[in-house]
Image (tube, rainbow, N blue to C red):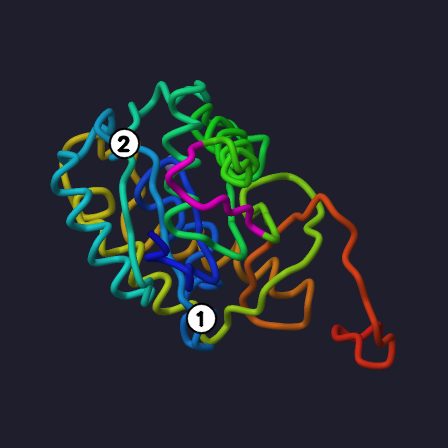
Amino acid sequence: MDTNTAGLDVLAIAAHPDDVEQTCGGTLLRMAEAGYRTGIVDLTAGEMGTRGSPEVRMQEAAQAARILRASLRENMRFPDARLENTMAGRMTLAAKVRELRPRTVILPYWEARHPDHYQASGMGFEACFLAGLRKFDQYTEPHRPYKVIYASQYANVVPSFVVDVTGQFERRMESLLAYRSQYGAVEAGSELFPDEAEIRERLAAIARYFGNLIGAKYGEAFVVKECMRVDDVCSLPVRTF
Ligand SMILES: [Zn+2]
């Protein structure tokens, strides 16, 4: 019965394969390099996308996960482009959270232009809550993540904290470019899809901006709903002058 007591240290939940690579891939990689067990759960396979089939995209996602040194990557195959935070969906995701037992969960920021992104955020949050209810399902152990953090790279908000991903930035870029069907030089939808040079420049500019906020080269931004606690004001990083 007790088959997965260890659990993941960090689990990133996102709407589409390649979301994690754009928003928190450097942080996942940095945690894996530090010896933590990390995982990714994508809610949809991106089957409504202009380019590439879901099968191809999922192969690319597996390759990207290897580059980010994630211990596992799974796809819930919820419907893409019309992701809904339904009771059935929440329950399925909650069962996954119970199985993977993450300590920290990374969700997309709760406001976004793409409806799938904010739906994924609400669904992830509620699934993490449900997963902690003993009576949710009598056959599996309850598990509630200790901490939920929100990847806010694309949100117009002041981050609660920024992770220095200077040492991980190139590999994170490599993980995103593993989605050859999305970012390669393909004809379909080329007016909609940036080429590699453009995507490199854009991601570097965003990461550089957040890195600059903490005195690092590249950073990834996060928001937490709780206050950040400090025990030692003499060891606070990021200089004032
Ligand atoms: Zn997305």
Tell me, yes or no, whether the two marked residues, 2 and 1, touch with CB atoms within 8 Å.
no
Q: Distance between the residues labelled 2 and 1?
A: 40 Å
Prevailing secondary structure class for the magenta stretch in the rendered image: loop
Name the disc covering residue 36, or none: 1
Q: Nearer the viewer, residue 213 or 162?
A: 162
Report the side of 37 relative to 55 (left or right).
right
Q: In which quarter of the image is residue 139?
A: top left
Q: Name the residue under label 2.
A: 191
Region rendered in magenta:
137-145
User: In the image, what residue occupies the spot 49% across and 30% down?
Assistant: 123
Residue 12 vs residue 237, the one in the foreground: 12
Query: Residue 213: image x %, image y %?
Result: 69, 62
Inspect the image, locate mark 1, and give the three-letter code of the amino acid beneath it. Tyr
Q: Nearest the camera: 205 or 214?
A: 214
Q: Is residue 116 magenta?
A: no
Residue 35 pos. (x, y %) = 43, 76
Say what secondary structure mark 2 lies in: loop
Q: Residue 211 carries which label?
A: none
Give, as a three-letter code, the residue at label 2. Answer: Glu
With respect to residue 5, does 128 lie above or below?
above
When the figure is inspected, residue 204 is found, relative to residue 61, above or below; the finding is below
Q: In this view, does 105 lie above or below 108?
A: below
How far from the left and from the top, in percent, is residue 172?
37, 63
What x and y, as percent, mark residue 83? 38, 22
Residue that appears at 35% across and 45% down: 41
Q: In this view, does 238 lie to the left or right of 201?
A: right
Q: Is residue 8 left or right of residue 67?
A: right
